[in-house]
Each structure stands twice: as C-alpha cells, then as structure tokens.
Amino acid sequence: MNEADTRAQYTDPQLKQSGWGEVDGSKILREHRITQGRIQVGGKRAKAEIADYVLTYKNQKLAVIEAKAEGESPTEGAAQAKAYAQKLNLAYAYSTNGKEIFEIPMKAKGEKIIDRFPTPEELWNKIYSGYNDWKTKFDSIPYEDFSGTRKARYYQEIAIDKTLDAVAEGKQRILLTLATGTGKTHIAFQVAWKLFHTRWNLRRDGSRQPRILYLADRNILADQMEFLVSRLPRDRRPIAA
C-alpha cells in the first residue's frame, strides 16, 4: 500500500473519527503549501515545501501531520514533520504510517506513540489552556484575504499571532522587525483588522466601531496601507491613515 492509499484508507478516517473537519470551526488542510520554494539562479524555484496535513481550529493552525506508507515505521516522517512544525511555529507535529501515530510536542518533552489523534478541542486546550479570553476572541476573527487575492505567508501569520498574543497578555510596547519586502504593511493591516473586529480598544461604549491610527515615516508606506484599506467596503475600514 503506497502513501496515498494509506492516507485514504487510514489517516483520513482517523482524523474524521477524532472530529477534524466535522467539529464546527475545525479544518484539515491537505497538501498544504508552506513555501513556494527558494528562488535559485536564473529565476527558477526549488521544490516547494508541502505538508501532508495541517490541522486548524478556531482559525488557528495547531499541528502538522506527515503520513508515510503503511510498510514504513511510524516515525519515518518525524524529522520532516518537525521541520514543518518549526517553520510554522506549531506546538505539535505527528508522523504516521496509518496504523500507528507518533506524537511530537514541539515545546516540551514526551514524544510517544498514541492510539488516536486528539480532538480539535483537546488539542486546543493542550496548547492554549493558559491564555485569557482575548486570545480566543482574536482567533475567532479570520484573516482578511481580499476575496482570496492576498493570503498571509507562513511567517506573516506567526508575526501576527505573536503580536496579538502580546496584546492579550496586556503588553504595552510591541516591536516587529522584518526585512524590506517581507510584508510589514500586510502584517500591520491584519493586526489592526483583528483588533478592530474584536473592539479591543473600547472600554465604555462597546456598540460603536473603534478606529486605529496608522503612522508611517514615508508617504509610500502610508499609500500601501491606504491601498489595502481602499479595497474594503467603507463601513468595514478599520484604519484612518
């Protein structure tokens, strides 16, 4: 039995049995493209990095799964799963041969064989049990993808999530540093988007919509944000630039 057959006959039913894709708010991203592939000499790209499965719940990526053929060891895909989980900043990685499931906590010890995949709620609680309600509120707001034309890259999602985690923890000063061309404006927009829709900065009048002031030291940077905001209906615009 090859890898594709193993996924179809074993892994997919196991995930369904644990509620993935069945429980409201849970999704299975199959053949999830993590990167487009490094640009090489001559403009060609190297092979893209693609995970077999990424599990999401409440608009948050939680774990990656690498599935190998039935005849392989359940740990055969462990190194690959770890590499993908590290790149995506995920708390859990799994490697499976369809018959056995190898669980890898990325931020703690305790790699082990388990008898089933955790349910969406079980995995969520294992990762976020110590967070306050603002974490849940921020995650309840999906990224704005402008009708599928502008999706966040994996490292942008990490930056957005870490920024909002800091906000949820009550931190007053947050600094993000990224290289030119990596999408700082897009990151700033998504952070503002989630703060806007959760009404985070309103303390007295929760019925009105908040406004966010966006400052930039060059007109071209302000113009980039203005362009993103202009693509939204006027009543959905969170920023006054």
Image (spheres, rainbow, N blue to C red):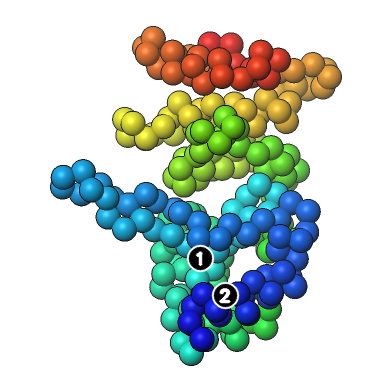
Residue 111 in view: no
Give the residue type that dot 1 points to.
Asp
Residue sitting at 71 percent across and 56 percent down?
26
Return the mark for residue 212. Answer: none
Residue at the far bottom in the pictured view: 71
Q: Nearer the viewer, residue 177 or 241?
A: 241
Judge whether residue 210 can be spotted in this image. yes
* Residue with the mark numbered 2: 7
Question: Which amino acid is tagged 2?
Answer: Arg
Helix, strand or loop at mark 2: helix
Q: Quadrant of residue 63?
A: bottom right
In the picture, measured across the screen, residue 206 lies left or right of residue 73, that is: right
Residue 217 position within the rendered picture, expressed as x and y whole percent measured from the top left: 38, 13
Residue under numbered circle 1:
52
- Residue sitting at x 53%, y 58%: 90
Query: Is the residue marked by circle 1 packed among few (<14), some (14-19), or many (20+) residues within 10 Å?
Result: some
Measured from the top left, where is residue 96 in percent x and y?
A: 54, 79
Q: Nearer the viewer, residue 178 or 221?
A: 221
Q: Position of residue 6 (x, y in %)?
A: 56, 80
Depth-wise, is mark 2 or mark 1 nearer the camera? Answer: 2
